[in-house]
Image (cartoon, grey):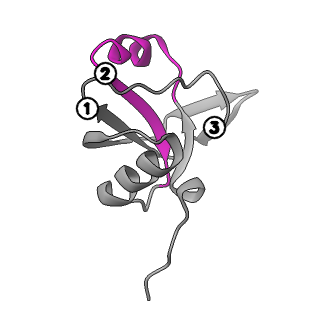
Amino acid sequence: MTLKRTAYDVIVAPVITEKATLASEANQVIFKVNPNATKPEIKAAIETLFKVKVKAVNTIVRKGKLRTFRGVKAVLSDTKRAVVTLEDGQSIDVTTGL
């Protein structure tokens, strides 16, 4: 059984960090994505939501860290991120909402 995800189900949020800002100079944008999303689904979602042409999609599964708060230990959940490389001349402004 294949579950059809919409573009908003695939893309969770943009990543706005210092490293993501440096990647934007290389025409790349980083997004948090659904852990079950595939590279073709991510590419299609970015192209439909932002009306841009995607050159490549690389994915990273970032393992959850162990955190302690008031003596209670907890493990943060794993997150999947997508580094989206755009074609030359294309750009995405992640500071504006969709």
Above/below status of 1 relative to 41? below
- Residue 27's label in the rendered image is 2
First-in-chain label (1 vs 3): 3
Residue 19, above or below 73: above
Q: Quadrant of the C terminus?
A: top right
Q: Which comes sooner in the sequence, label 3 or label 2?
A: 2
Q: Residue 30 location, x and y as percent?
A: 42, 31
Q: Which mark is residue 69?
A: none
Tell me where residue 2 appears, x and y as whole percent: 43, 83
Residue 87 got which mark? Answer: 1
* Residue identifier under label 3: 73
Q: How far is mark 2 from mark 1, CA to CA?
A: 8 Å
Local crowd at mark 3 within 10 Å, few (<14), some, or many (≥20)? few
Residue at image position (55%, 64%) is 6
Compute the Cα span from label 1 to label 3. 44 Å
> Does the magenta portion include 3?
no
- The amino acid type of the residue labelled 2 equals Asn
Q: In the rendered structure, which amino acid carries the disc numbered 3?
A: Lys
- Which residue appears at 53% of the width and 46% of the height? 49
Mark 1 residue type? Glu
